[in-house]
Image: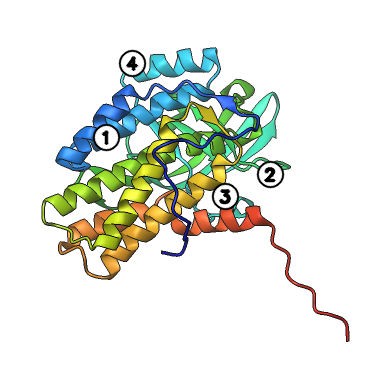
Amino acid sequence: MLISQTMFNYESAEQLNRPSVALSQPTHELESILQRIQQDGLALHYRSFMQNFAHLFSLFLTPDQYDRARASIDAGSALRFLMSDAGGPTLTSWRTVAEPEGDGFKLHIDKVWGMYANLDGMAIVAARTPGSFFPSAFLVWPEQYKTLKRTLCGEPFLGDVVQLGNVKGTVQVSQEDRLKVGGPAVLNKYLTTVRPFLVRALMAHVDWLANQGRLELTPDERAARDFIAAAARTKTLSDRYESEDVHRVLALKFASNELLLHLVSRGAVASFLDQRDLLAFTKMEGSSYRCYHELRASMRVAKPVSDSL
């Protein structure tokens, strides 16, 4: 593990005397699904688990955006979340750019590794906006999404349940399609809200693999799994969003990625397909590289200046 911490009881949430934002998370269904993942593994419940992530996005939609999105979803349009960019992990290199045009934006999209992104639906697209230090997010509606070029990316994994796709093209979006609830860091807030649930699902899946005899855990590895799961659980039980949570959750996802990579690299996972599944979840959005990049950038550590001779 590349991140070490002193032991802490994560079964009780930290109390911080700092301003925070209240969250009203519709998480009861997610809690039920997490229990079923512990019993049956992730593959059987992955679709329903990810569909509930769309409900968490309701925290960051205006009432008009929510009503239109809800109507699209009720009509059968699944929600795609397009974050990983063909230009690389750093915002300045992104090829997905929202250029101001008239009363809206011309949204040039070049996204990769989107879950089920090859299928029809609607999308939330993360984009670089000139002059902004944070990625912006835009709603792309079903009729617009159909016009984009969508291609399969690799073979399906997790028992043929998860298929990734790449998306490319240009659509015109309005100011009303831009996500503004939550301020300029709306994507950080969303990812900070949902990533701990994903970490809990992955740790539950690891536990299931071990119970099935498909994964061998040493006492230290089980302690690491339990520690990560408990930390993620504490965050998902919190009804507050703290600014410090962004870095805590990045470190949490990084630790989860490193544990999965460690288990595969040391030969603890016998099946190639199980190995591929675990590694796939370390390479999607929230990859170790991106988590490390964001954590390091946030520290703003200056290089030491040598004494003058």
* Disc number for residue 95: 3
Q: Residues within 10 Å of mark 3 (few under 14, many from 20)?
A: some
Task: Give the CA distance from mark 1 to mark 3.
Answer: 35 Å
- At 66% across and 38% down in the image, what residue appears? 99
Read off the residue under disc 1. 34
Q: Are marks 2 and 1 in contact (CB under 8 Å)?
A: no
Residue 188: which disc? none
Q: What residue is shown with label 4?
A: 74
Circle nearer the N terminus (1, 3): 1
Q: Residue at x 50, y 54 (%)?
A: 291
Horizontal side, residue 132 vs residue 293: left or right: right
Quarter occupied by residue 71: top left
Label located before the other in sequence (2 or 1): 1
As shown in the figure, which amino acid type bears the numbered disc 1?
Answer: Leu
**Label 3 sits on what residue type?**
Arg
- Dot 4 or dot 2, earlier in sequence: 4
Q: Secondary structure at mark 3?
A: loop
* Vertical order, 192 against 122 (above or below): below
Look at the image and tell me in which quarter the N terminus lies: bottom left
Please tell me whether mark 4 or mark 2 is closer to you in this view: 2
Q: Earlier in the sequence, mark 3 or mark 4?
A: 4
User: Element type at marker 2?
Assistant: loop
Q: CA distance from mark 2 to mark 1?
A: 35 Å
Q: Residue furthest right?
A: 309
